Amino acid sequence: MANNQKNNNPFYTNPLETYPGLNIEDLNKYLPAIRTVEDVSMTLETMSEGMFLAKCLDGIRQLPDQSIDLILADPPKDLWNSFTDNDKGKTLQEYYEWNNLWLEEAYRVLKKTGAIYLFSPWEYSGMYQGLLSNLFKIQSRITWRRVGNENNSKTWKNHTSDIWFATKTEDFFFRKDSMDLGINDMRDTTKVESNLWIDMPHTVKDRERYPQKLFDRILEASSFKLNWVLDPFMGFGDVALTCKTNGRRFIGFETNKDHLLLGMKRVDNS
C-alpha cells in the first residue's frame, strides 16, 4: 500500500517552474513588465523608480548627475561572474579596474549630501578601502556579525564582514540623534553608538543575502522618506523590499532574469 501511494505521487510538483519561487502565473505577470537598460534613461525631472535588467555600468551611466541620495552596493566576489560586464571573466587587475569604473560612476550620480555603503568580505576589504579613498570621504568601516560566512581554511572561522561607509563631501546627511545605531554594551544597559554591529539576526530568510534589519539601520541613518536609493547589484531585491517598507524610492540593476523576476514578485507581494 505504501509503495502504491508513493508511485501515485507526481514527480514534478510544477514542471513549468523555471526558477524556485516562480510559476507560470508569475511569468505571465512579470515577464511583460521587465524593463531593460534602454528604459533607464532619465533626467532629474523624469526620475522614476524601477528594477531593471541591466549590467551595473550600463545602468548607472544612464542616470543623471547628482540624482541619488544613497547607494547600497554588494559587488560580485567572483571574478568570472558575468555581472562584471565580461562573460569571459577577469583577472584580478581587470577586476580592480572594473570596480574603479563603476565607483567613478557612483560618485558622479551621488548627491553632494549623499553616501555609499559598500559591502565587502574581509578578503577584498583593503582593496575597496583604497578604491573608495581615491574618490570619496571614508567615514567608517562597519564590521558586522555575519554568522555562516565562514572560510574553508584550517585556522579561524570568519564570522564577520565589512561595510565601508563613505560620502561624497563632508556635508553629508546622517541622522545621528534620532535613531538607535548601537548595540548593548555587555557592561551597561544603555545603548552605545558603534561601528561594531554584533546584534544582527543569526539567520536570514530564504534567498535574502542579508538580514533586513541591516538595511533598516542604514536607511534610517543615511536617508529619509522619498530619498532615491540605488542598488547596482540587486540580486533578489532585498534593498528594494526594504526601501518599499521604509518609504524610499528605489532604482536597482540585475543581470540574472530569474533573480530580477523573483525580486519583482517579492516587492509586489510585500
Image (cartoon, rainbow, N blue to C red):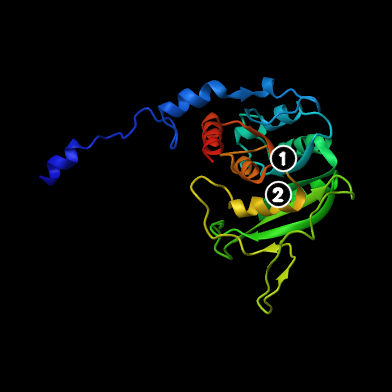
Of callouts 2 and 1, the N-terminal one: 2
Q: SS at mark 2? A: helix
Q: Quadrant of the C terminus?
A: top right
Q: SS at mark 1? A: strand
- Residue furthest to the left in view is 1
Q: How many neighbours does mark 2 have within 10 angstroms: few (below 14), some (14-19), or many (20 or more)? A: many
Q: Residue at x 75, y 57 (%)?
A: 141
37 left or right, relative to 237: right
Q: What's under tag 1, amino acid-wise?
A: Val
- Residue furthest to the right in view is 170
Decide: is 15 above or below 188: above
Give the residue pinned by disc 2: 219
- Image location (x, y in percent) of residue 254: 61, 33
Please indicate, yes or no, whether residue 173 appears anywhere in the rendered image.
Answer: yes
The label on residue 165 is: none
Q: Quadrant of the N terminus?
A: top left
Please indicate, yes or no, whether residue 125 appears anywhere in the rendered image.
Answer: no
Q: What's under tag 2, amino acid-wise?
A: Leu
- Image location (x, y in percent) of residue 206: 48, 47
Q: Residue at x 52, y 26 (%)?
A: 30
Of 165 and 245, nearer the camera is: 245
- Image location (x, y in percent) of residue 188: 69, 78
Give the residue pinned by disc 1: 229
Marks 2 and 1: CB-CB under 8 Å?
Answer: yes
Decide: is 76 above or below 166: above
Q: Residue at x 60, y 36 (%)?
A: 81
Q: Report the number of discs.
A: 2
